[in-house]
Image (cartoon, grey):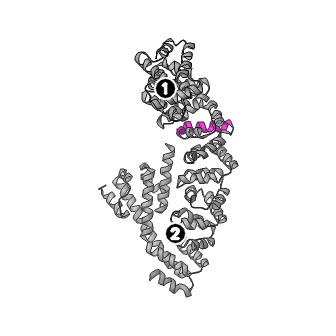
Amino acid sequence: MPGSQLNVDVEILKLARVVDCEASDLGYLRHVDPQEIRDLREQVTVLMFDADRQMLQRVASSAKLIPTKLAALVGERAFGPLLCARLTGLLEPSRAVDVAARLPTPFLADLAVLLDTRRASRAIAEIPPKQIGEITKVLAENEEFIAMGGFVGHLSEAALRAAIAVVSDETLLRTAYVIENKSNLGALVATLPRTRLESIIATANESNLWIEALDVLRHVSEAQRGELGDIAAGQADEVLNGMVRAAQRELLWEDVLPVTRAMSDDSRARFAALKSIHTRPVLASIVDAASRHALWPELLQLLPLLPAAARRRVAALGTGFGRPVLAQIVGAAHERGLWGPLMQFATELEKRTQVLIAKLLAAVDDDVLDGLLDATWEERLEPELAQLCSLLAGTELRKFAGRLVKRGGDEFVAALRASAKEQDLVAVSKVLASA
Amino acid sequence: MSTKGARALEDELGGRPPDGLKALSDSDLRAFAGVLHEARKRQSAALESAVEQSLEIVPRMVRGPVRKVLFG
């Protein structure tokens, strides 16, 4: 997948910076898992600090003896960005900030690229927002997305705002994609006003950065995912179609479906109405993603919103579903209260699959059956349930009818019988009467 | 990991590398051990030279105390 390959490249580049070589020199690591490369970097970082720890510590101590202005001069002229980056975490944070205030911005930008942000976290947090903005501007000009991504989570909120203010939407998306700690993406998104988020989503489409944008959506909270999904759904068709094309091309439906889950009903309806998702290849990819990543609830939510022709295509795709997959779908309908979409969808499937679903429903536990019966009563799903019952025969039908009578009660059974009669499902009507 | 490359990398790291590196060939492991070795050498040399240079930059009056902190 392009996403994981890019993560490998990012991790190799980060490691290359720690050992002061070109990323291309470490090309043999491209087949190693990104997390393993990250673990290796951690080991190597400790090693590089420990290698000269005593001398680095002495330098940091000697820096206390000279005026700040002179320390900055020595840092810039004698030590250079790499050694200054190593020293930053060893200085008192306030002293590091004072020295940084006297260093030129391009030097600080070079130093920022080489800094181990966790070791220098306290100093980073104390750098004034204005200076952070200035450094960020240079980093953005140099396309140092990884370095910028390493700072998120260590900056004060004011500094984060100052940094965001000086970078383009494209830079922000590229930075978010390579951010060191993805759990910080929520805080980053939270600082962005709605107008900026709208502009970022439009940029994702214009600059072909949907992989980056969808990666953000994957890592934020469910509420933020919903908010961003609603903003996306509020954009022109062209933008949403761009997202569909990217999701199809890069196999990103596992990221898109959770967004449709989190968005509002109106937004979901708007998404489901997009002609670009009604094609057979796209629907096949969506069904495949639902199957691979247990995203049946998300698919069930979308189904009733699709036009009849698209639903029929999904039903045709469901023809090959075996019993284990259908059991997953039934389980999802129960857990998320999506019996309505499931029952409607079931009646659109071809008969063999309908029979499998009917048999699964007949064999569910009592608590699942109670959920089905409640939904049937509340959503008037008696016609669909009667149809599915009619696919059972002999003992299986009699046993299921007995359970329906026992757990549904008189009023429910009367309604189900009436529906069976209306549809000329004589066997169902009879067995319910005698159960 | 028992190849020469693996042992060279373990020696450089001072511990076992992550398991995922087992997939690398012996020559790749040796190459990475070499990268690490060179990086440490370069850093130490750069630090030594930077310390020397810094003593030339600091004014004569504080050079003594600074030298004392640096070299004991």
Question: Which three-letter amino acid code belongs to the residue tagged 2?
Answer: Gly
Question: Which three-letter amino acid code belongs to the residue tagged 1?
Answer: Arg
- Label 2: chain? A
- Label 1: chain? A
**Which label belongs to residue A236?**
none
| Residue A175 drawn above or below residue A130 | above
| Residue A426 drawn above or below residue A43 | above
Query: Residue A35, image x and y in percent?
Result: 44, 52
Magenta highlight: main SS: helix
Of the two numbered discs 2 and 1 in the rendering, the one whose residue sits closer to the viewer: 1
Q: Quadrant of residue A139?
A: bottom right
Residue identified by numbered label 1: A407
| Residue B64 drawn above or below residue A130 | below
Q: Please provide the residue range marked out in magenta.
A: A235-254
**Which label belongs to residue A89?**
2
Q: Quadrant of residue A161?
A: bottom right
How many other residues sit within 10 Å of disc 1, few (<14), some (14-19) or many (≥20)?
Answer: some
